[in-house]
Amino acid sequence: MSIRVAIYGYGNLGRGVESAIRQNPDMTLSAVFTRRDPKSVEIKTEGVSVYHIDDAKNMTDKIDVMILCGGSATDLPTQTPEMAKLFNVIDSFDTHAKIPEHFNAVNTAAKESGKIGIISVGWDPGMFSLNRLYANAILSEGKDYTFWGKGVSQGHSDAIRRIEGVLDAKQYTIPIESALEQVRSGSEPQLTTRQKHLRECFVVAKEGADTAKIENEIKTMPNYFADYDTTVHFISKEELDRNHSGIPHGGFVIRSGKTGFNKEHNHIIEYSLKLDSNPEFTGSVLVAYARAAYRLSNEGQRGCKTVFDIPPAYLSSLSGEEIRKNLL
């Protein structure tokens, strides 16, 4: 039986999820939900209807897993707990400092409803989180380093767009190359957040908006920009569309550690991603975890999970026998 997946929010990430569902034969797209007028939204999948988000509550018997594609700044903190009262849910909540709070809210809702919620799914948090855990378990004495970029951060771009007076924006996260070289050398440098990355913002302001106020709000925004050296450029909508239409990203998770009775041997574990399309890759991760949510739900499990709690085999459409034969 095909897993019936729905998309809640049809922006860049929602389209990425739709694309990923097409590549997974054990899944079907059952519905797309939007805040916009459904008649104004055109999707790529024939025969699938678009509904207003208010209609979701009437379709609980037609959806196995709801993938939430809203932003972490203001959408997911309320949407995920609310939807977990009705559906098995997956989200890509990526405000690292608020994950414990978000987990508790979703866990309470999902346990009460008897549903599964898997939060903070993507590549960071997500794939990078798993690699940090594996590396820490293997090299118990060492240091972790995570570098992002160069690439567009959807969460940070979304946070800028929600500032009053902003029409559109793109934010690039840029690793500082000298810091990356120090880490790869195994010298285990002490690096502050500011020493590892730069943030560069390209902002289209609404006519008459106070650009100085917008710039200050960006640079002082907690959890997003306050801890980084941030540059803000105000440009036209035409320039943004012409020069910043892509959504690439990537990054590195590195752990350096020592082994031996005298700690005489150095080791570097490095995991990297280079992504042409951040939302399409993130959507692919979300879809894999939707499969896991479906399986956990069928087993009778309930409550909130993270990527740490999911058996890797549950992500794959292959049988246990096939996985052991071909991937082990």
Image (cartoon, helix red, strand yellow):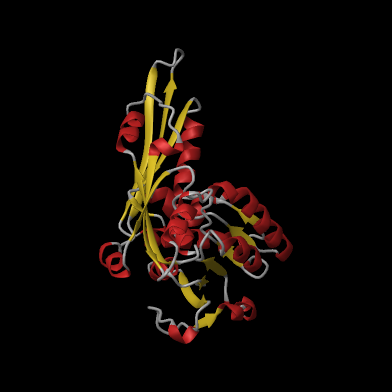
Question: What residue occupies the far top of the structure in this picture?
Answer: 262
Left-right relation of 149 to 298: left
Q: Position of residue 131 (x, y in %)?
A: 45, 41
Q: Is residue 198 above or below residue 168?
A: above
Residue sitting nearer the eye, 232 or 61: 232
Front residue of 25 and 144? 144
Q: Residue at x 37, y 37 (%)?
A: 270
Query: Which residue is at the far left?
Result: 242
The image quadrant of residue 187 is top left
**Residue 3 in the image: x percent, y percent?**
51, 70
Expressed as whole percent of the image width and height from the top left, the position of residue 192 reads 45, 34
Q: Which residue lies furthest to the right in this view?
A: 112
Q: Relative to 304, say whether 198 is above or below.
A: above
Q: Can residue 300 be seen in this view?
A: yes
Residue 298 visible somewhere in the drawing = no
Q: In this view, does 208 lie to the left or right of 31?
A: left
